[in-house]
Amino acid sequence: MRARAAALALYFATGCGYGAVSVEGSFDGERFAPTGTVFAVVDAHVEEARPGGGVAVIDRGDPTLQLFFCQPAIDPDVDFAGLGGSEIAQLRDEVARGDRVVLRDLSTSTLAAGVRLVADAGRTDFALLVLAGNPPIAASDSYAELRPLGRQMSTLLTIERATVEEGGQVAGALAIARDRAADQPANTATGSVTLRFDAPILHERIGESNLRVLGF
Amino acid sequence: MRTRAIAGALTAALVLGGCGYGDVAFSGDFGGRAFRPDGTAFGLVDALERLPELKPRDPARVIAVASFAAFDPTADQEQLPGSELTDLRHAIEVSDWFSFWWRDRQQVVAGSAFADVVLIGDSDGRYVDSDSTATGRSDGFQARFGVARESLSASASYADYRPLGTRAVVTVHLAEVDLGTGGQLRGNATFKIERLDSDPADAATGSVSGEFSAPLVGERIAEKNFDTLDLYGQFEVSR
């Protein structure tokens, strides 16, 4: 356990986190708190196989922004792929155990203060992945107490500030509403959580590499 | 359990300490990027096919492998504790390595020379695609190699990104060949990375060369370690 703590200290911040996230609301009392880390990456380049061999790195044209939230406090300025294999495995486990949100394909040409973007059943301004973590359970916990989260989701992203460049920042609020789907049980947890965030924009190469290492 | 702990401690020491197995002494660089697969070098004679059933491989092939990661290829790496095995797999994946594959052991004699032309298969610096259109390649010989992944700083940008040249010419000259038990392959190798017309003007080129000595390891332990360490996948060659 001591060795594990020492290894994690290499890249886990001491609780102050990376970026800033606060949470309002819950899903019927079920906490959702990807508050340890938030950062953004502007995806401006793409790798393409060239006819005749090799790989070219070319400008994407319309850069997109990715926004990443996770529960543990990690330092994305560290090159994760340069860590040892078992440290990477620990890092992935820690991130996978907690709540996470990933927004992709946000067109940077539309990002400005006051912009409101939506992802729900009818409109998709961005791609969204919301993953609830796995809180610890006790030996006496049973499935009877298990409350599924509402699957019917709608999200509203409101941009308050945006300096869309490497080293810049994007700040705003992400409201996630969960409703019960028709085939879900009556005790399904529903409600709304709002994440207020201020996300540093990482340099693209390390940001994308680290997201790949984390499996995103 | 004690054996396992000792094996684990030994491998950890090898990975970190660079004690090594076999010998590789290269010099030169690819536009400032070194290539030093000098932690482990070994060879094997692949005389048996394992699937669908064990039977003689005709002809037997010969393989030489080297990696910057230092480990003992005569020890069963599957017996390592999980975290150490994960460390070793990752170290092999991201550091310098090469592999040479001869289709027929009859080709592998002292004084012989071989060449292959390979193309980079991805931006991770792995030259794993033989250029079937190139001239000067030796029949029945395949070279594969990977240049260590670049370490990224927080401010690394694509504006500063300097890719490796797409094409590489690998030549090998064998000075000593003993394919019997306890034998070895010894010779020298040159890895020359070139720029294609379609490469960016600043693509890194250069040449690395030097001597290698790869002691032969028993086929069964070597192939089990290939499986355990996913070396077939890394080298993109068939079992």
Image: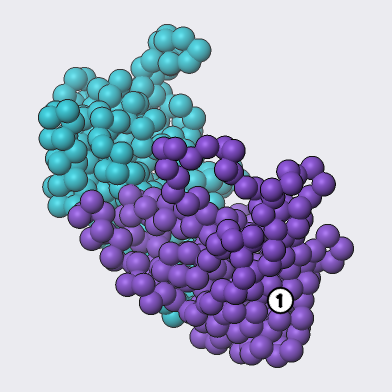
Chain colours: A purple, B cyan
Q: At which x and y percent is residue A192?
A: 68, 67
In the rendered image, the vertical position of residue B228 relative to residue A24, given as above or below: above
Q: At which x and y percent is residue B89?
A: 35, 44
Q: Label 1, on which residue?
A: A157
In the rendered image, the vertical position of residue A182 relative to residue B44, given as above or below: below
Secondary element at image label 1? strand
Quadrant of the frame with the N terminus of chain B? top left
Return the residue found at the far right: A122
Residue A100 found in image quarter: bottom right
Q: Residue at x 45, y 45 (%)?
A: A137
Q: At which x and y percent is residue A81?
A: 40, 60
Q: At which x and y percent is residue B109?
A: 29, 28
Q: Amino acid at mark 1?
A: Leu
Residue B230 found in image quarter: top left
Give the side of residue A44 with respect to residue B204, left or right: right
Judge by depth and name the residue closer to the eye, B155 or A115. A115
Q: Residue at x 44, y 37 (%)?
A: A140
Judge by depth and name the residue closer to the eye, B194 or B154. B154
Residue B189 in view here: no
Give the side of residue A211 with respect to residue B29, left or right: right
Q: Residue at x 42, y 9 (%)?
A: B55
Image label count = 1
Subunit under mark 1 = A
Residue A115 in view here: yes
Q: Residue at x 50, y 12 (%)?
A: B52
